[in-house]
Image (tube, rainbow, N blue to C red):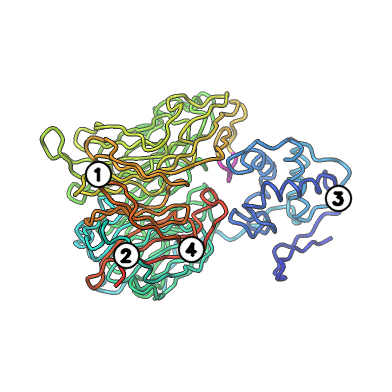
Amino acid sequence: MRRLLFTSAGVLLFAASVSAQSGPFTPEQVTRGEAVYRTACAGCHGSQLIDGPAPPLIGFGFLDKWAARPVNLYLNIVRTMPPGAGGSLSDADYASVTAWLLEQLGHAAGTEPLVLGSKQAVSALVQPSSGAPRKAPPPPAFIQGMSSAPPGAGPTQQELNAAHSSTRDWLYHTHDYSGTRYAGLGQITPANAPKLRVECAFQFGEQSVFQTGPIVYDGRMYLTGTRTTTAIDAKNCSLLWRHQWVPRGREVWPKNRGVAIKDGYLIRGTSDGYLLAISATTGDLIWARRTADTSRGETFTMAPLIFEDRILIGPAGSENAISGWVGAFRLSDGEPIWLFKTVPGAGEPGSETWKNPGAIKQGGGGTWTSFSLDPETGELFVAVGNPAPDFPAHLRPGANLYTNSLVVLDVRTGKLRWHKPLVPNDSHDWDLTQVSPLFKGPVNGRDVRLVATTGKDGILRTLDRETHTALYQTPVTTIENYDVPVTHTSIHACPGVLGGVQWNGSAYNPLTQMLYTPAVDWCGTFQAAEDDAVTYVEGANYMGGTYRRDKTSQGWVTATDAVTGEVRWRYRSDRPVVGALTTTAGGMVFAGELTGHFTALNARTGAVRYRFQTGGPIGGGLVTYELEGRQYIAVTSGWPSQFWVTNQTGSPTVFVFALAE
């Protein structure tokens, strides 16, 4: 028997020959499983298993991932579904929804019910008709494009070094190497902000996660989606060019937060592990090099940094138990220059901080937010993410270097300058996410080099970059049971897995001498699995337990004294704040909210001076720049992933604002 699945438009989704042998599940389980799926799963995976925001559950891509690991598929459904509430359904419902999925893949019901733990039965069913998983050719290591970087194109290294003083452009993901998210533009002020108006809007066109942080250079704005890169006119939003990447390998965590630019090269990562060099002028591919291994769970989500001839980037994927790293790659062709391991190998410095009494798989140390850099000292500041497995910290005793640490590397050699563990031996998935901005402040009568750090633990810490000590630790969200480790007994704690500061960090205004920090206030219940149940499943999140997020959440923008950590004011949002903040010389803080609102705040008081409903949640970048003597603000709006959406998804769109003329 051969089964074909079609969309309503008649497009073939999956075809497979089905064995005449009936499967070990019953028609009654299929009926019940469909009801469970519609209630608990369809919101993410879609009514047809392929038309939702979560990964498709049919097709050869699905079989490539799971056909060789059918038992793991079954266990993964039980442990991780529904998202944020793994293990919350009954055994009967998990068996039923698995039966329904197998039936959708073309297998026939039989007379014997599928029972939780029926490994042999599930294994027999998920294999494709050939008896072996379909194999795709290996992804090519290097692809030469048809274009080259235009000679004399910018920005130059001198322009990037001076980006902190630029008012015309926004040259790096966080504005400048220091990550200040501050622009010395004073045209828009608390007094005239109510006169802001939409100048133009650009619909991105790719229905994917939209977390991009725009950059602006010489009147052009550059944006990314999961596979698409575009350039638009930063004044009128007209499309200049569009580049579409076709994945060559398995995609992991499909999302992208932006590009880096230098000398006419536009550099970005992809979900299938490639670095792309695109002509900033034409949008044509210059080269592509596979530098992350998605078969190991590595993926690129961060916007890279370019300094001199080096592209600096690292892979995300801590929950996939990767062994994280930070790498430098040559701008002209992507050739590797150096690599620093954020999870040391056996016998390497730092490996002694990873004890392994249970002989389990250990890893983590992913990097998924942009770096900061002091070009004068050559120090590259890196925020390293969580260890894995996430919850059972007692199975990996020690500080677990260099996870959840501020790591400072020599940008030219990759050698470790210094490091600071900020959440050692983490048991809550509390990644360190931000190591910016870099700034100077008066401490004990002298001007001191400082670095602000934030993470998913919800604590703002500012460190002296010379002594490596923290000046203060200021909570920017709700803190509960912070020092209580996750054990086999469930515990409610704040922040939760989705709490604290996510992929956009603090902004620093040198005129107000304040830091402005976006935060998520979202708690949940943690529980580590029994030790013998902590098993690594390739391709699945390696949490080592369960987490159930609370039904309610909110968000904050907190203004603190940059040197003392004293809270000056707080703005509350009805939803978590994951969008970027930007502050200016005009005394403004610009914010984006998951409610869909672009919000302009008085930088000194927090008073709302303007709000605009964009029609979609804001989870990406927000930048400001100047063209022909006029200040503009660009705001990204649209679906920032299933975790941050309720009933309003929006369409990926960039809105450009300016004062009414």
Q: Residues within 10 Å of mark 3 (few under 14, many from 20)?
A: few
Disc 3: which residue: 21
Toward the viewer: 83 or 532? 83
Foreground tag (3 vs 4)? 4
The label shown at residue 514 is 1
First along the sequence among labels 1 and 4 = 1
Q: Amino acid at mark 3?
A: Gln
First along the sequence among labels 3 and 2 = 3
Q: Position of residue 114 (x, y in %)?
A: 80, 40
Real-space CA distance between mark 3 and mark 4, rounded to the nearest whole angstrom: 46 Å
Disc 4: which residue: 652
First along the sequence among labels 3 and 1 = 3
Residue 494 painted magenta: no
Disc 2: which residue: 195
Toward the viewer: 404 or 89? 89
Real-space CA distance between mark 1 and mark 4, rounded to the nearest whole angstrom: 31 Å
Mark 3–mark 4 CB contact (< 8 Å): no
- Secondary structure, mark 2, is helix
Q: Is residue 415 above or below residue 214?
A: above
Going 66% across and 36% down the picture, which residue do you hit? 88
Real-space CA distance between mark 2 and mark 1, rounded to the nearest whole angstrom: 25 Å
Going 42% across and 58% down the picture, which residue do you hit? 212
Mark 3–mark 1 CB contact (< 8 Å): no
Q: Amino acid at mark 4?
A: Pro
Foreground tag (3 vs 1)? 1
Q: Amino acid at mark 1?
A: Met
